[in-house]
Amino acid sequence: MKTIQKLLILAAALTVLLTALTACGGASDSLKAVQEKGVLVGATSPDFPPFEYLENGEPVGMEIELMQAIAEKLGVTLKIEQVDFDSIIPGIQSGKYEVGMAGITVDEKRKKNVDFSDVFFTAAQKIVVQPGSTIASKDDLTGKTIAVQTGTTAESVCMDGGYELLSFTSNNDAVAALTSGKADAWVVDSEVAATLAEQQGLVVLDEAMTEEPYAFAFKKGSDTLVQAVNQALAELKADGTVQKIFEKYDVAYNG
Ligand code: GLN
């Protein structure tokens, strides 16, 4: 046999061996990888109360508690990285973070870039205005300036609507644009709208612009990790833990 033939056979054998090793739970087993290091790295943008916000510099909130309970079931410690919302999905894709927990709405475009867990809550996009505003519904937004957070579904919905936008990397800056009068309205997810409107004396309009199912986001192909998270989530839903977490923050659980 010629040397080149031998080399080709050797290369083919190595490929088969490597494929078999990967399939047997090597690097491709996302759950095993997380359990072996004992840490689940989660990314959040803690400007989204009551799902995630800062208390004494530490991220707290419903979603943080929920992911902590899930991590406990997986037997790992949750390590939280604080990042801007629009950096979460790219960071998951590059493998920097293993899970995104940021009130992330499941949508078809994102499904091309990340895998989602089962849904744990359904929210809506709401319009927030100053007391006494002439804006009383979506139709009144035409010609007005709307504050949104960069990379969110609020931004895409308002862009699709052709409205004039001011886009901020932080939700705190988006709400500040409304309170300072730079923007006429702020479009944001329902529970965040309710929480911050109450804290800052703002008004949330009844009309919902969209319906938004929330789930946790993972790197594409994290099948075993997503399955384990879904199993843990199902158990926490069934034993009332999820409901209790939501009640603690005065939110009616609808998951
Ligand atoms: N649910 C919205 C989205 O997924 C907003 C999330 C957020 O601002 N944290 O875009």
Image (tube, rainbow, N blue to C red):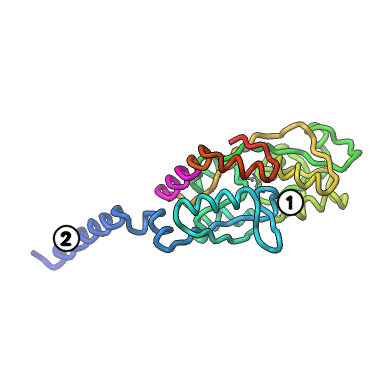
- Please provide the residue range marked out in magenta: 221-233
Q: Is residue 135 left or right of residue 70?
A: right
- Between residue 180 and residue 144, name the one nearer to us: 180
Q: Return the x and y of residue 177 as percentages of the image width and height.
A: 82, 52
Element on which disc 2 rests: helix
Q: Name the residue that disc number 2 marks.
A: 9
* Image mark for residue 155: none
Element on which disc 1 rests: strand
Q: Return the x and y of residue 215 as percentages of the image width and height.
A: 56, 43
* Dominant secondary structure, magenta: helix
Mark 2 CB lies closer than 8 A to ligand 1: no
- Between residue 64 and residue 7, name the one nearer to us: 64
* Image mark for residue 167: 1
The residue lying furthest to the left in this view is 1
Q: Quadrant of the C terminus?
A: top right
Nearest to N terminus: mark 2 or mark 1: 2
Q: Quadrant of the N terminus?
A: bottom left
Residue 231 counted in the magenta span:
yes
Q: Label 1 is placed on what type of residue?
A: Ser
Q: Return the x and y of residue 6 as percentages of the image width and height.
A: 14, 64
